[in-house]
Image: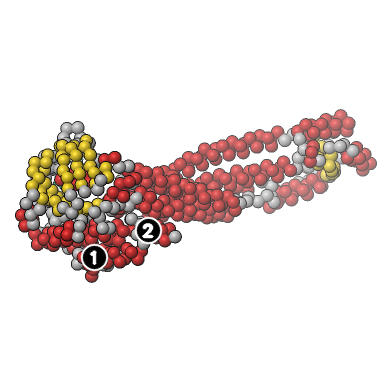
Amino acid sequence: MEAIRYFLFRSLRNMASSPLLCSAAILTMGVALAAVGVFLLVVLNLQNLTKDWRDDIQVVAYMDKVPSATELDEVLQKVKAFPEVETAIFVSKTDALQRFTKRLGEDSDLLTGLRADVLPASLELQLKGEYQTRNAVQQVADRLKSELKLEDLQYGKDWLEQFESFTTLLELVGVVLGGFLVFAAVFIVSNTIKLTLYARRDELEIMTLVGATLRFIKTPFIIEGLLQGILGGVLAVVILYGLHHFVLKDGLQVLLLTPAGFTIEFLPREMQLAIAAAGAFLGVLGSLLALRRFVRI
Amino acid sequence: MIQLFNICKSYSKENSALKDVSVHIQKGEFVYLTGPSGAGKTTLLKMLYGAERPTRGQVLINGQNVTRLRRSRVPYLRRQVGVVFQDYKLLNSRTVYENVAFSLEAQGKKRYEVAQKVYQCLKKVGLEHKLKSKPLELSGGEQQRVAIARALAVDPLILLADEPSGNLDAEVSLDIMELLKGANARGTTVVMATHDLHLCHLFPRRTIHLEAGRLVNDSMP
Ligand SMILES: Nc1ncnc2c1ncn2[C@@H]1O[C@H](COP(=O)(O)OP(=O)(O)OP(=O)(O)O)[C@@H](O)[C@H]1O
Ligand SMILES: [Mg+2]
């Protein structure tokens, strides 16, 4: 216990005696981790978005001619008899416009002046959970075509698949770039610790001369790396929070053309902790690397 | 206590700093190591605290073969061997107290033990009133006395001194000499490298003379 206090005291004194170097290390660590964090944030939100879209897999049949009430009843009846269909809703032209207006949110003034019948009426089929697959969707579509003569169908989610492969690509880029940034962070931390070691080379030499073990010499520097890493990680989370709050929340919304009502989320608590932990790990790694080259008996 | 067998040391291919040196030093001896500049005095002392390893030959300290010592064991050797340098090697950013405490802390001594021992040792060298000063606020002689206090604080078996008064005037070097003799009188084996033949005549002791890396004379007074 006393030993821990002693080592902690020594590393805090080290840090206090070279505040500039110390804050440089924390800053670089913070920026590098924040850059990785931005990627995490974007990927995470894209995943949320695709999940949202997945959830409403449906088949939409557009109707050029608006059917009469009796015709419509008949169609609805038939469709509801399909085993795959959970719900079937008729969306009239006015309903469609209303919905679209709502979806656009603040930008809805774009639509003023348009006639109420620009959007087609449609039949929206929500499929039961177990039928939300490509095959089932295809079957339903086929039956709609053959039995009900509904031709103008929208159901294929090919673009969704494409979008998902895009997010996968983005994740890959994130991993590569993140790896690179993390490598740079370790390099910089290790170099700043080398600088502090260089500044205290007299002390290190004297320590070895008076019979200090390597562990005794190294421990304060490892603690220093640990503390700097944790502080860097916390700084990264703070930077990310700022970025999210002031820039990304609105910026990404526009960039990703997300529907109103979808909010760009911040990293969950576990990930914030993970970033701090990554900082701690990288800090220790950095100091170990520096010490290995610098402290010899 | 100290046994050197046929020590050769070369830092590079062409020249060798020590050539076939064999010396035995008994427990409690006081030995001068003399010779012109470049004769290999510092190199020989370095062998004794594990800072350099011989190219050939064996070094035994207190029966322990230093040449075969693993790196991780070197600190434990150095706890038995105090070293004093010409340039003191004090930490200028720390107080006198902290400088002396340093060697005790490095060996993992308890805090109250450290405080007691530091005070005792500084008293021995007559600097107990300068506890809180920084080394650069002291004279050269006082700084060297702090360095000696640091070396002796851990009760070493052997005290090595590499021209401890090389930077100091004659009067102050007598003070330093008294401290080393005092340590020797209390049982510590002392090996002191020096240029100062005057000192050797004033306090005659066994003298080992090196020249160009060879032991040319080993004489008792
Ligand atoms: N680290 C080193 N690398 C290469 N050569 C060295 C090294 N240390 C010493 N030498 C060489 O070894 C020889 C002996 O040096 P050493 O320092 O032991 O002499 P010395 O007797 O202590 O001299 P002085 O009285 O000037 O201190 C010299 O020729 C020196 O150039
Ligand atoms: Mg020398």
Q: Secondary structure at mark 1?
A: helix
Asked if disc 2 and disc 1 are in contact, CB closer than 8 Å, the reply is no
Which chain letter goes with mark 2? A
Q: Is residue B71 left or right of residue A107?
A: left
Q: Is residue B155 left or right of residue B196?
A: right
Q: Which scheme is used to colour this image of the protein?
A: secondary structure
How far is disc 2 from disc 1 in space, using C-alphas? 23 Å
| Quarter of the N terminus of chain A within the rendering | bottom left
Residue at left offset 18%, top offset 54%: B28
> Foreground residue, B50 or B165?
B50
Residue at left offset 17%, top offset 51%: B191
Residue at left offset 20%, top offset 47%: B2
In the rendered structure, find residue A10 and report the number of the disc placed on it.
Answer: 2
Image position, residue B114 (x, y; %): 32, 63
- Asked if residue A278 is positioned above or below residue B16 in the image, the reply reads below
- Asked if residue A234 is positioned above or below residue A43 in the image, the reply reads below
Q: Secondary structure at mark 2?
A: helix
Q: Residues within 10 Å of mark 2 (few under 14, many from 20)?
A: some
Q: Residues within 10 Å of mark 1 (few under 14, many from 20)?
A: many
Which chain letter goes with mark 1? B
- Find disc 1 in the rendering and name its residue: B122
The type of residue carrying mark 2 is Arg
Quadrant of res B209? top left
